[in-house]
Amino acid sequence: MKPNTPIYVAGHRGMVGSAIWRALEAKGYSNLIGRTSAELDLRNQEAVSDFFQTEKPEVVIDAAARVGGILANNNYPYQFLMENMQIQNNLIDYSLKADVQKFIFLGSSCIYPKLAPQPLKEEYLLTGPLEPTNEWYAIAKITGVKACEAIRREFGKDYISLMPTNLYGPNDNFDLKTSHVLPAMIRKFHESKENGNLPVEIWGTGTPMREFLHVNDLADAVVFALENKFEDNLYNVGTGVDLTIKDLAELVQKTVSHTGEIKWDLSKPDGTPRKLMDVSKMENKGWKAKIRLEEGIAQTYQWFLENQDSFKQVKI
């Protein structure tokens, strides 16, 4: 990979894409290509075709997706299924047609069966039913994984899929209607603290186990995958360490310095009981996560404090 290789980062303004962009710049890559959703609608086949013909990227990193937490997945199943398939199908298909040699597809640990053995190994894909609360997003991502695998098999191109665990970090989504659990907790605890340490209500029982990866670590893994040859199609990216939602809540509460009560809404779903990634394949390739959860949450909270004015439109 040369410093001036044209690299297209789809979704470069999002949490994941912006982290990848920063990591590429830090490594000296100077020919980065990005388009906002207003500039390029990735759901539009003709627009994507014109983009590839004009820009001619040699590498494509797909960090573009419609994402959200349990509530958003439950409320908008069709959009999560169809829009994600449109985005990734256009990117993958036109990358193949444009003879793009390196394609990195980013998915999610939710592609694995709800009750798969723990930790989750790559070979568990398609061995059982998915978690119902996010199956629409998961099915879309599975089709992307399989499309890249099919291209590797049929055309011999270096198209790989990286499946990160739960992500967090700068540029995360703190909208309480659509966010994931960790940024939602940061915002809830902070705003409750600002209003006299009011009680904070959290969905479920607090017993599910979750693993969290700082987005800068994922970006580092993407650059690693870009610069190395991978023999297989699918690789998990995570820390290999998890904790209960209850422990996470207490860690965020401590970081934010909230001293009120935590209330658990038992009428709301827990989701998958546990989602711990087996990250041995990536570690055997020579990559390992570096940012500890306590450090990462503190950094993310600081970013939230510096940018919270943009979140004021949604109240607890």
Image (cartoon, rainbow, N blue to C red):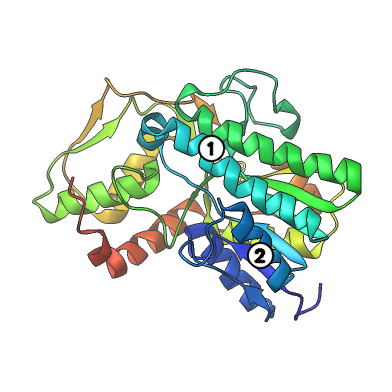
Could you tell me the amino acid type at mark 2?
Asp
Direction from residue 1 to residue 170 in the image, left or right? left
Q: Using the rendered view, name the quadrant where residue 287 is placed.
A: bottom right
Q: Is residue 272 above or below residue 299?
A: above
User: Whole-percent x and y of residue 100?
Assistant: 80, 61
Which residue is under mark 2? 50
Disc 1, SS: helix
Q: Which residue is outermost to the left?
A: 196
Numbered marks: total: 2
Along the line of sight, which residue is nearer the eye, 165 or 149? 149
Q: Using the rendered view, name the quadrant where residue 204 is placed.
A: top left
Quadrant placement of the N terminus: bottom right
User: Whole-percent x and y of residue 35?
Assistant: 55, 68
Which residue is under mark 1? 82
User: Whole-percent x and y of residue 68?
Assistant: 42, 42
User: Whole-percent x and y of residue 40?
Assistant: 54, 63
